[in-house]
Image: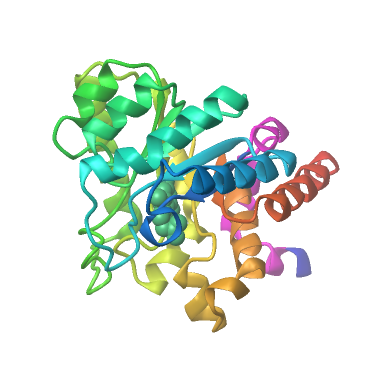
Amino acid sequence: MIENSIKTQADQAALANLSIADLNNVQVMGILNVTPDSFSDGGNFSHLDSALKQVELMIENGVNIIDIGGESTRPGAVDVSDKDEITRVIPLLKAIKSRFDTPVSIDTSKAVVMNEAINYGADMINDVRALQNKGCLDVVAQSDILICLMHMQGMPRTMQENPQYEDIINDILQFFVQRIECCEQKGIKKERLILDPGFGFGKTQKHNYQILAQLSSFKKLNLPLLAGTSRKSMLGQLLNRDVDQRLAGSLATAMVAVQQGASIIRVHDVAETVDTIKILKTVAQYNQ
Ligand code: 8Y7
């Protein structure tokens, strides 16, 4: 039958697991970078002001969570000191918290930054190192905020050199199981955790698309999934597009991620992603 040939078993499994309630809970996380090139002095008013304008725009466009990052984790990026990262991120967190109700996530791997972020009312810690750095588990255990545990193979400076896995999905699943266990041992409840396979973090092109195709495999751990493919080189390489020409690729991958059960989509282009998800939700209402 034609229907059977176009609808694979994997498609059916992914769609069958997705309820309208799941879709209605999908959240858009807007990226707000405060890295050296863009905001070298995070406390400086003009930079703070322009960051706040970006936040306002994201809120108008329907963002659900703002993710503030003061450390560049791009391949080859250099390390940032504790003090510099705090100066970039905390004044902005305070400014957002005093003006808006939108939840704020702080993208950091440093215990001191996490501690400051928690003290100033952050709602989530987004850690690309999954709380593996010294002191992170302890700091987070003393709060009740949400934590995104991301998978990365290697470290940003060298992670793209020769990533290798025995079985990528299973290897990432094992990593998640181990990190969840470490959190629970410290008294961090499972309900506070969100999992993210970490697109582009120690993964080849093939690995990235394999993860996207099989993202729903991680649902078996019964935690919300976060997916971030926005403007990444997995799109640039495949489509031969520069970073400012990757909107279609970003939306297409966001759509697949949502269909595969992702609960949070981390993006640069909030308005367009909100539209894309709205289409999916509407279609799902008629999909019996
Ligand atoms: C991700 C991320 C980045 C991601 C989570 C970029 C900070 C690279 N990517 N955090 N951070 N997931 N949770 O291109 O995929 O945005 S930085």
The residue sitting at 20% across, 59% down in the picture is: 154
Residue 265 appears in the picture as rendered: no
On screen, residue 239 above or below 231: below
Q: Which residues are magenta?
A: 4-26
The residue sitting at 41% across, 73% down in the picture is: 205
Magenta region includes residue 16? yes
Residue furthest front as drawn: 45
Residue furthest bottom as drawn: 240
The residue sitting at 24% across, 38% down in the picture is: 110
How many labels, in total?
Answer: 0
The residue sitting at 64% across, 52% down in the picture is: 12
On screen, residue 133 above or below 208: above
Question: Considering depth in this image, is 156 or 164 the residue closer to the camera?
Answer: 156
Question: Considering depth in this image, is 284 or 69 the residue closer to the camera?
Answer: 69
Q: Is 244 displayed left or right of 118 in the figure?
A: right
Q: How is the image coloured?
A: rainbow
Residue 169 percent location from the top left of the image? 35, 54
Majority SS type along the magenta span: helix
Residue 186 appears in the picture as rendered: yes
Question: Considering depth in this image, is 65 or 81 the residue closer to the camera?
Answer: 81
Residue 28 percent location from the top left of the image? 61, 42
Residue furthest right as drawn: 286
Q: Is 41 displayed left or right of 268 in the figure?
A: left
Residue 26 percent location from the top left of the image? 63, 38
Residue 106 percent location from the top left of the image? 41, 37
In the rendered image, which quarter contains the C terminus? top right
